[in-house]
């Protein structure tokens, strides 16, 4: 699971009002190189929940992203490279996603988060 | 990539070895999958450079077809863990990246409008009535650009009306009618192989609609 996916996923347990962002528990992660595509990043930037990305990247051991951002930073190649790396090249392989409201763990196994709910959570 | 090349890549994918009837798991044939993604890309520009989600991805055929056509980011979602494992192996074989999420689409909570295009071959809802419409409803909520889907031709009017009236689609268009070969997978299938007429649809969601 990469951090763009993490930026979309939300706890879906019945009754949870603020299920985003999910916390990360990292047991194993890998980095895989992806072709750099600045146009894609510029288009994606306004749709990303920045704080969630910064926090998730830090948990994965990558602390290079600035806390505060504005769209003028998209002119900087250096910034785009960091954004690219955090968003697309870090893979959580084993670990869990944690519901911010209830603390419920959603296991991540072989890179696949299991968001299936128990009967009493639907 | 040419249509023929796409179809032959998809023809090599591993399919379900023991499909689950309750999930209406029918493999999406390479013929149909390649045509769906090829027209999405070549007629509408909905694939290359986009974020594409494959709903009920099964062994990953549609999502991997999107990746082969240079989608920037592909996410496959399925309720069945065996399907996801198969999809993951198929992605590895083709040396493609595909994100996979184990989830029931009827209670997917998805933040924001990151997904551009949703592609799906939903359960036709023959055994689990309305399943295809739940998929479509969710697709129209999360996609910002388009939803491509297959539905039985016999349900054409119903699909159109529901998409426009209840799911707030801006447009719903049948791109073509295809024959879906359903091989004899399950015991209740009496004939060796049957052809089902299906429509390939393109739905356009409303822009800037409220978040899910």
Image: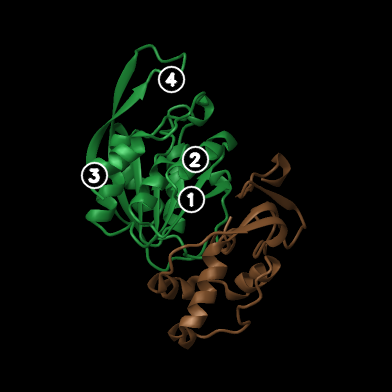
Chain colours: A brown, B green
- Mark 4 / mark 3, whichever is N-terminal: 3
Residue identified by numbered label 1: B98
Name the chain under label 4: B
Location of the N terminus of chain A (image quadrant): bottom right
Confirm whether residue B74 shows in the render. Answer: yes
Q: How far is disc 4 from disc 2 in space, using C-alphas?
A: 19 Å
Residue identified by numbered label 3: B3
Determine which of the numbered discs, if any, sits on residue B185 in the image: 4
**Residues indicated by labels 3 and 2 sit on the same polypeptide chain:** yes
- Badge 3 density bin: few <14, some 14–19, many ≥20, Cα 10 Å: few
Name the chain under label 3: B
Position of residue B61 measured from the top left corner of the image (x, y, whole percent): 40, 40
Which SS class for mark 2?
A: helix
- Badge 1 density bin: few <14, some 14–19, many ≥20, Cα 10 Å: many
Location of the C terminus of chain A (image quadrant): top right
Q: How far is disc 4 from disc 3 in space, using C-alphas?
A: 27 Å
């Amino acid at each position: 699971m990469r951090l763009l996916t993490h930026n979309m996923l939300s706890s879906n347990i019945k009754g949870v009002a603020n299920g985003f962002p999910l916390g990360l528990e990292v047991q194993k992660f890998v980095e895989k190189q992806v072709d750099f595509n600045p146009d894609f990043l510029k288009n994606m930037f306004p749709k990303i929940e920045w704080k969630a990305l910064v926090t998730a990247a830090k948990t994965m051991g990558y602390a290079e992203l600035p806390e505060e951002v504005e769209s003028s930073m998209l002119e900087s190649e250096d910034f785009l490279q960091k954004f690219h790396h955090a968003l697309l090249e870090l893979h959580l392989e084993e670990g869990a996603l944690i519901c911010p409201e209830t603390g419920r763990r959603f296991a991540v196994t072989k890179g696949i988060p299991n968001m299936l709910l128990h009967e009493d959570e639907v | 990539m040419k249509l023929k090349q796409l179809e032959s890549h998809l023809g090599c994918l591993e399919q379900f070895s023991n499909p689950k009837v309750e999930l209406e798991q029918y493999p999406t044939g390479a013929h149909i999958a390649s045509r769906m993604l090829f027209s999405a890309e070549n007629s509408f520009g909905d694939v290359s450079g986009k974020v594409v989600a494959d709903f009920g991805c099964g062994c990953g055929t549609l999502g991997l077809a999107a990746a082969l056509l240079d989608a920037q980011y592909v996410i496959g979602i399925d309720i069945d863990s065996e399907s996801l494992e198969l999809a993951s192996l198929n992605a590895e074989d083709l040396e493609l990246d595909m994100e996979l999420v184990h989830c029931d689409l009827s209670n997917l909570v998805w933040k924001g409008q990151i997904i551009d295009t949703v592609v799906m071959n939903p359960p036709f809802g023959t055994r689990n009535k309305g399943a295809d419409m739940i998929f479509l409803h969710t697709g129209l909520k999360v996609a910002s650009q388009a939803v491509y889907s297959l539905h039985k031709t016999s349900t054409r009017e119903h699909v159109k009306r529901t998409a426009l009236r209840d799911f707030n689609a801006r447009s719903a268009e049948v791109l073509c009618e295809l024959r879906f070969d359903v091989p004899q997978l399950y015991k209740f299938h009496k004939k060796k192989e049957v052809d089902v007429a299906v429509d390939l649809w393109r739905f356009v969601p409303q822009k800037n609609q409220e978040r899910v």
